[in-house]
Image (cartoon, helix red, strand yellow):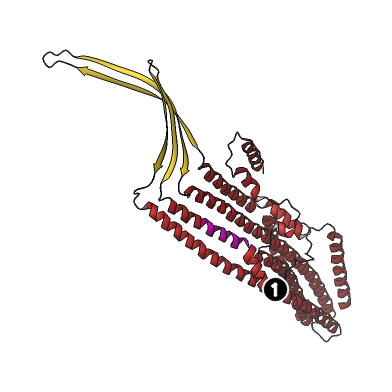
Amino acid sequence: MIGRLKRVGMLGLAGLVLVGTLGAARAETLGDALRDAYINSGLLQQNRALLRAADEDVAQAVAALRPIIDWTAGITRDFNRVRSGSSNTFNPGSNGTAETTANVGFTASLLLYDFGRSDFLTEAAKETVLATRETLRSVEQLVLLTAVQAYMDVIRNREFVDLRRNNLRLLQEELRAANDRFEVGEVTRTDVAQAEAAVALAQSGLAVAEGDLARAIEEFREAVGRDPGALRAPGDLPSIGDNLDAAKSAAMRRHPDILGAQRNVTVAELNVNAAAAAKRPSVNLTGRLGANEELTGQGFSRGGSVGVELRGPIYQGGRISSLERQARAQRDAQLARLHLAGLQVKQDVGNAYANLRAARAARAANIEGVRAAQVAFDGTREEARLGARTTLDVLDSEQNLLDAQANLISANADVVTAAYFVLAAIGELTAQDLNLGVQIYDPAAYYDLVKTAPVPISPQGQKLDRVLRALGKQ
């Protein structure tokens, strides 16, 4: 009976291998999942829209340096009534007048000089755009890393389910064998009960594994934007150097959190300069052109003026000084944030490398553990056939083999995930770095269209309208 069980197990394993071989040609890769995650991510779409909003801040800052022209139009109804009388003779009399006047006018102003305040604000808006681009790159890394984890979790839990199902089939065969041997008096009722308990435990483990797989599929759908197909375990891991110090130096040069923090420090410095310049006067060129005409009479007037205006603050209740102090405090906060970002990035790189080394060591140990557990299980089963081992010994040995195989499955998934965590910690987990073969989003494309603040009737404005319509269809 034990020999028949061994042949059943080998046939089942051969069947799994054959199915895996036939499905390999149709299996999707991790790169496929990462491409779909990059294309379908709503989080990326959200942050791209936020970047476009930051681009518009540059356009608004540029527009503030151009002439500002407004128009006004209105109709005015003026009327009065006068009553008069003599102090000796009451002979009242009254008369009244009324007239309706239409007016139209144009006003224009142009900033000539404000001690650089507008220029500081424009440069701050540009630096904010660059910082927002780094935030977008950080979000891209998060999206792709989440997709890697979801991909490997589906593979892990599918293999768990297959392992549990195969284990349940073997235990059910063991139970049938125990019942047959009990019928002929070779084993006791205790041996049968032990086999029944093992089958019930295996059924429980299978139900848990199937629940974990269902959750992993939901996470995959959220991360990638579609249901998982036949997933193939990654073969080649990304190239990662062994020099931890070099990796930390690379992260300090190119990690988006570092670069974004540096841009924010520059923004804060420019805002300090702008706040200081706000205490100084500004010079503006002003112009006015207007016309008034009496609709009920013949009167009309035309007029205009051109002048240079010098305007500056005298007293605003301490608001200007408060704004300058606030800008300096925000600069100090951004400097501290940059320092903390550097510490965090270095720590993340160190942790990622430590986790990768631990995952590789655990995989090597679990490979040896599976080999040893398989040898122990085969020997225990053979000894049980000869009567030197009990049914409980066989069940315990099979459970040890199951645990070793499950640990190896997790270790394989952990190595892949840990490798991509290293890339993310360095700042190299982007679609461009991974060569995913997908159309890379160009963060400068929209900026180039709006940075000059085009008006709708200009060729640039019309091109921008076409881009906006295309974005609205996405």
Residue 294 location, x and y as percent?
A: 39, 19
The 10 Å Cα crowd at callout 1, few under 14, some 14 to 19, many 20 or more, is few
The quarter holding residue 367 reads bottom right
Span of residues in magenta: 254-267
Instruction: Please report the residue visible at 39 percent of the width from the left and 52 percent of the height from the top.
Output: 320
| Predominant SS of the magenta segment | helix
Image height check: is 447 above or below 294? Answer: below
**Quarter that holds the N terminus:** bottom right
Is residue 260 on the magenta stretch? yes
- The one of 28 and 287 positioned closer to us in this rendering: 287
- The one of 327 and 468 positioned closer to us in this rendering: 327
Residue 255 can be seen, yes or no = yes
The quarter holding residue 230 reads bottom right
Task: Specify whether 228 is left or right of 62.
Answer: right
Task: Specify whether 383 is left or right of 419.
Answer: right
**Quarter that holds the C terminus:** top right
Residue 372 location, x and y as percent?
A: 80, 81
Badge 1 is on which residue?
Answer: 243
Residue 196 can be seen, yes or no = no
